Image (tube, rainbow, N blue to C red):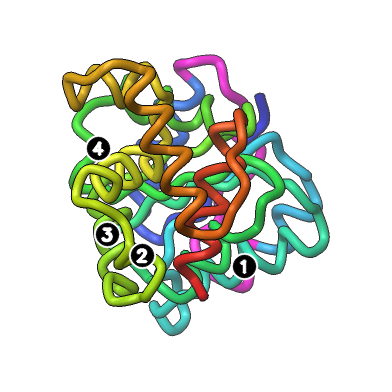
Amino acid sequence: MRVVIAEDLALLRDGLTRILDAYGFQVVEAVADGPSVLPALTRHRPDVAVLDVRLPPTFTDEGLQAALAARVEMPGLPILVLSQHVEQLYARELLADRRGGVGYLLKDRVSNVGQFIDAVRRVADGGMVMDPEVVSQLLARNAGADRLGELTAREREVLGQMAEGRSNAAIAGRLFVTEKAVSKHINNIFSKLGMPPSDDDNRRVLAVLAYLNG
């Protein structure tokens, strides 16, 4: 599996490269600044991109902007954002694009190598991986939206679990309820948000986040 990395810190960039190599990935290029990201992605067309948000020269949102630009040229390009920051505007735009795997993890909350490798594989396979803190910030921004306000406390809890990419079975285990109850809550959520239910976990989470972007 071919990977492009964008990370400005040399030690972390080298560490990510070594870890991915050790687990059978092929890091085809590792860049250190924003202007180098898009050329590297278009040149290699990797199976997945691992990007920081803030890169030189401005250290603002170059990584996410490059990711969005790459998605225009390569629709469905799997992208895993690995950052210390939650950039809500561009994160929402990336998550609202329903094509291809996407993930957003906070560096200081990735607890072990196995967790990171699993996230890379899930995103490369077209899935979604979301740090709970990222989900919390994205949901909080629109907590006062009329339709979202119609959700019960339990439905909001289920929505948060969905946005983290968990299956119905995983949600049931987390909340100590039956899968049937989870399915009922999810149907209610989509009904209240004016969205049809979907059996595709990735599409359903992206649909919810796309709505929250409105």
Circle 1/circle 4 CB separation < 8 Å:
no
Q: State the mark number for residue 66.
A: 1
Q: Which residue is mark 3?
A: 84
Q: Which residues are magenta?
A: 22-37
Q: Earlier in the sequence, mark 2 or mark 1?
A: 1
Q: Is residue 29 magenta?
A: yes
Percent x, y for residue 59? 39, 78
Q: Earlier in the sequence, mark 3 or mark 1?
A: 1
Circle 3/circle 1 CB separation < 8 Å:
no
User: Alpha-carbon distance for marks 3 and 1?
Assistant: 17 Å
Asked whether 155 or 119 is in front, the reply is 155
Q: State the mark number for residue 148.
A: 2
User: Alpha-carbon distance for marks 2 and 3?
Assistant: 28 Å
Q: Is residue 166 magenta?
A: no
Q: Earlier in the sequence, mark 2 or mark 4?
A: 4
Badge 3 element: loop
The amino acid at mark 3 is Gln
The amino acid at mark 2 is Leu
Residue density around tag 4, few if under 14, some if 14–19, many if 20 or more, within 10 Å: some
Q: Earlier in the sequence, mark 1 or mark 4?
A: 1
Left or right of 189, for residue 38: right
User: Alpha-carbon distance for marks 2 and 1?
Assistant: 31 Å
User: Alpha-carbon distance for marks 2 and 4?
Assistant: 29 Å
User: Alpha-carbon distance for marks 1 and 4?
Assistant: 23 Å
User: Alpha-carbon distance for marks 3 and 4?
Assistant: 11 Å
Q: State the mark number for residue 110.
A: 4
Residue density around tag 2, few if under 14, some if 14–19, many if 20 or more, within 10 Å: some
Badge 4 element: loop
Q: Is residue 50 visible?
A: no
Asked whether 122 or 114 is in front, the reply is 122
